[in-house]
Image (cartoon, rainbow, N blue to C red):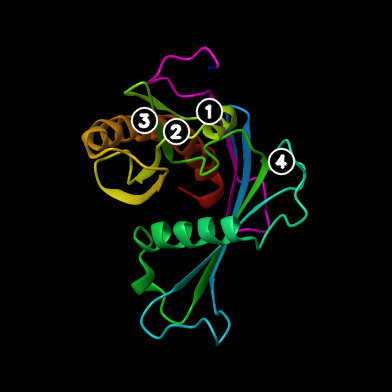
Amino acid sequence: MDGRRPAQIRNINTRLGLNRNAEGSCYLEHGNTKVLCAVYGPYEGKASKRLEDRCAIVCQYSTTTFSGLERKNRPRGDRKSTEISRLLEKAFESVILTESFPRSQIDIFCEVIQGDGSNLAASATCGIVETKPIVDLTSREETDLLPRVTLATICGRDEVILVELQNRLHIDHLSVVMDAAKATCADVYECLAVVAQQHLKACAPILGN
């Protein structure tokens, strides 16, 4: 609907290390979707969340009251935000070496400043229009009752760590949609990897390497 080809992702702009109080932080623009993320820890967490054999991952996903066309009374804590927070926790638990940090906690905060679809911004959202898969959906495209799959992989490879399906999708279309989403993950990863490498090179003198 916005003039892109079906397999074309929106422009990506990323800045790292913006929050000096956090162990890691990122500002990501994915088209008109804009997200701030910050990571704190590992640190000795609350006793109620402490795990003896591994690190506890706690994610908080929220949106600003002005992030969409309609103002939200509750920017966090609603059912959808809680559901996405749990999805993010499961995804990060599969890639973080939690066994290396027993009895500790890592907090990950994701704040959507402006939402224009595919708010799980570093993943790929793929839908079906007239039996053809389209990737990286905007909010206008998501408002249609399209079947859509949100997918995340490790380093753009085939190893899937997050899958979310919304609306009904015929089994005949599943493999096509999954292949298109995996290819899009690889495209997103290439963009993010370049930024990460440049950031590491800039930090190397500070770290003494």
Find residue 147 and report its horizontal and vertical position in percent: 40, 37
Q: Which residue is mark 1?
A: 141
Q: Amino acid at mark 2?
A: Leu
Residue at (40, 31) in percent of width and height: 127
Provide the residue designation for mark 2: 146
The one nearer the camera, 115 or 54, is: 115
Secondary structure, mark 4, is loop
Q: Residue at (55%, 41%) from the top-left corner?
A: 119
Chain-order first, disc 4 or disc 2 = 4
- Per the image, the residue denoted by label 4 is 67
- For the record, the magenta segment spans 2-27
Task: Report if the CB atoms under discs 4 and 3 are less than 8 Å apart.
Answer: no
**SS for callout 1:** helix
Q: Are marks 2 and 1 in contact (CB under 8 Å)?
A: yes
Kind of element beneath mark 3: helix
Q: CA distance from mark 3 to mark 1?
A: 17 Å
First-in-chain label (1 vs 4): 4
- Left or right: 195 in relation to 173: right
From this view, report whether residue 207 is shown above or below residue 201: below
Residue at numbered disc 3: 184
Residue 129 seen in the figure: yes
* Residue at x 49%, y 34% (from the top left corner): 195
As displayed, is residue 150 above or below residue 100? above
For the stretch drawn in magenta, the main secondary structure is loop
